[in-house]
Image: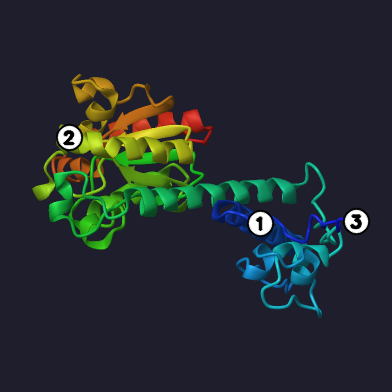
Amino acid sequence: MGEPRAVSPLSHPPRLDAETREALRLLARGLTGALEVAGLEELPRVTEPTAATTMGVPPDAATRPTSATAAPGASSLGVLASFPATAPQAPAAAAPAMGSEAEALEIVRDTQRQRAVRLKVLADEVIGACTRCKLHRGRNRLFFGAGNPDAAVVFLGEGPGADEDRTGQPFVGEAGQLLTRMIEAMHLSRDDVYICNVVKCRPPNNRDPEPDEVEECERFLKEQLAIVQPKVIVGLGPHACHTLLRTRAPFSRLRGQWHRYEGIDFMPTYHPNYLLRENRDPSKTRKREAWSDLQLVMLRLGLRA
């Protein structure tokens, strides 16, 4: 009898189970994507393993590309082997000088973009077409919030009114015009502030939001405030202030005094709708009191009165 013939360990490779083949395929796809990000374009696509890679055909024959692109059925290992180990790197963009005005402005813009994206995700993906409480049954539009995502001051109402429910925009009626004048009196514009409500849907007949409705919406309000990170919240009207401050103290004792909500300075003042009604009685001076409240806010923000 002659010498026994040596058997190459590659002559009959072990068959890979489906789980192992899938793991290798995903690994190859991830590596290929990394090369593309690094600057190598028009990479051959990773294909599913074929019988040639698992049924005893020598790997070099099954995976070696025959041209600039891999042959159909080639494994991802052969594709990756045809590229250099170190991918060419794209030249880095020149950074602005440290401490320059351009650098500071870019940081501000990046912060605003990030916060705007997070607010949009919260509005569209988390809240979405909300049906968490009964208020959704009668709404036309859900009002989430509007304004500067990097605002130092947030104006917070109790809930959308009829105009907000119709347009999806905050304070667009006569009360909105008055709020705009109040903001401008602070040497700000509506583009400088952020406006939102305790609840996102209009209560029927403009009634006060009920506790279960507030409970469902308040968690989203807290997320909004955590994203915007204002220095001051101006609470508009007694219901919003009583609800968030967890107190039934007379509103006359709340307004004009600093409070805290979610770690943020909170100043209660009159709702523009109330000021419009009160304006018809010349004996009342609520507008002066509201202006006094806003002056305290300006002082806290470092704005000139």
Q: Name the residue under label 3.
A: 3
**Amino acid type, mark 2:** Asp
Label 1: which secondary element: helix
Q: Residue at x 24, y 40 (%)?
A: 158
Q: Mark 1 points at which residue?
A: 30
C-alpha distance separating marks 1 and 3:
47 Å
C-alpha distance separating marks 3 and 2:
87 Å
**Which comes sooner in the sequence, label 3 or label 2?**
3
Q: Which of marks 3 and 2 is in front?
A: 3
Q: Judge by depth and name the residue closer to the eye, 12 or 138.
A: 12
x and y percent of residue 131 in the render?
21, 49
Q: Which mark identifies residue 212? A: 2
Q: In this view, does 102 lie above or below 304?
A: below
Q: Judge by depth and name the residue closer to the eye, 135 or 274.
A: 135
Left or right of 278 in this view: 17: right
C-alpha distance separating marks 2 and 1:
47 Å
Q: Residue at x 55, y 49 (%)?
A: 114
Residue furthest left in the image:
205
Quadrant of res 47? bottom right
- Residue 39 in view: no
Q: Residue at x 55, y 56 (%)?
A: 18
Residue furthest front in the image:
1
**Amino acid type, mark 3:** Glu
Label 3: which secondary element: loop
Left or right of 207 in this view: 25: right
Q: Which residue is drawn at 47% across and 45% down?
A: 187
Asked if the residue at tag 1 contacts the one at tag 2, i.e. Cβ–Cβ closer than 8 Å, the answer is no
**Amino acid type, mark 1:** Gly
